[in-house]
Image (cartoon, rainbow, N blue to C red):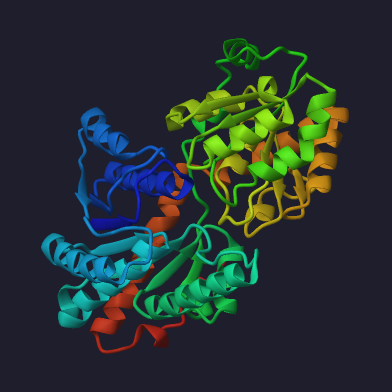
Amino acid sequence: MRILHISTRLILGGSQENTVLSCEGQAHLGHDVHIAFGPIYGPEGSMLDRVRAFATENGRTIATHEVPDLVREVSPLRDRRCLAQLDALIRDIQPDIVHTHSSKAGVLGRLAAWRVWNSNPARAPAVIHTIHGPPFMPVEGSLIGRTKVRTKNLIYTLAERRAARACHRIVSVADAMTVQFLARGIGTPDLYTTVRSGMDTSPYLAPEPTREAVRAELGIDESDFVIGTVARLAQHKGHDDLLDALGGDMRADPRLKLLWVGDGWWRERLMERVRTLGVEDQVIGTGLVPPERVPVLLRAMDVLAHPSYREGLPRTVPQALLSGVLPIATDTDGTGEVCRDMQTGRLVPVGDAAALRAAVRWAREQPNEARALAERGREECRVAFSMETMVADLQRVYAEALRRAGARVAGRSVDDDHGARTTS
């Protein structure tokens, strides 16, 4: 089977890692795998070297295609050119499956694939889209700011409604994504299915290197209590809320440390806040790290904080659980499907600095209970978030999409076929 994945940016990030792992797993199964993406730039890193190294190490090629005008920002001129570029790419590759990821690539990729479909249904691909996170921004700030966000959300909603009619299946990484999209009138329930965002679990489950060794490498004492984050230093990831919640406690107790794993456009502003709070000696920033470094750094943490404002289902939460680290996360989108309060972690309201502070204090004061929650989550995540489970689930989704596409070729609308597996 020839599979073309389309992703907006191949930077270091959760949705991109999901996409690359899907490509690798499918290549191992013997499929002819291609991945298309827009220009890569900025401090957020790239996964392109990993894709290229995969071919060298495994003798199986994942073909790469840069699409010059596939950019994250809404740009009518470039978006029109991108649509033509994707159309030409799909006609050239002639894939059996077009699988799009992220909102911009998802809208343009699906529309391009459907144009190919309508021109020659007998040779056209089945079209699948994965929702990794909601494109809709929180409505906040000034009146002008709220108006801009509402306008942008409306544009995305209309675009997603149109794109949903141009695909055979929609995959959500969390049930919450399906609920949110259906509430906005995007697609119909029979179009959706949930496939957890898989990962290579073995590095997180491995016993080495030890917590003590990693802490020694980072200059962290065993008596320190470390609250870690694994996220881009960017808007809506909640680093400001973490400083609001813990700044006072950190000034009162030098053993309280923050370990920030990642980089981003907000780095300088956040570090200036750290200096203003007078806790610069208690914040350890790793900067950009390769994905294989993340399991190692998680071992240095006592808790993983993820106070994000919007997510699909943040991969860092099951990664923490696989590492035996308690997650403390905000109750946004699909996060609570894995981090269930007082069962597999601590879940706090979005933007609630007091609740975030209380959860951190609880974890510090109740280490045995915190470890028990993490261990329960670890056992749940071993299978649910394995790469093998994800790739097998996608195989079933592809088979269903091909069946629905075949029904369309035979003269029946895919909307008339209600035999699809629905949200799980």
Quarter holding the N terminus is bottom left
Asked whether the viewer can see residue 342, the reply is no
- The x and y percentages for residue 47 are 34, 39
- The x and y percentages for residue 70 are 28, 59
Task: Give the residue drawn at x 21%, y 38%.
Answer: 60
For residue 129, above or below residue 290: below
Quick check: 240 left or right of 313?
right
Residue 363 location, quadrant: top right
- The x and y percentages for residue 390 are 46, 50
Task: Give the residue drawn at x 46%, y 36%.
Answer: 200
- The x and y percentages for residue 185 are 53, 82
Asked whether the viewer can see residue 411, the reply is yes
Task: Give the residue drawn at x 33%, y 61%.
Answer: 99
Which of the two residues, 406 or 267, is positioned nearer the viewer here?
Answer: 267
Quarter holding the C terminus is bottom right
Task: Give the residue drawn at x 34%, y 77%.
Answer: 166
Instruction: List the single residue furthest toward the left.
Output: 92
Quick check: 163 left or right of 198?
left
Quick check: 331 left or right of 153?
right
Residue 312 location, quadrant: bottom right
Which of the two residues, 273 or 354, is positioned nearer the viewer here?
Answer: 273
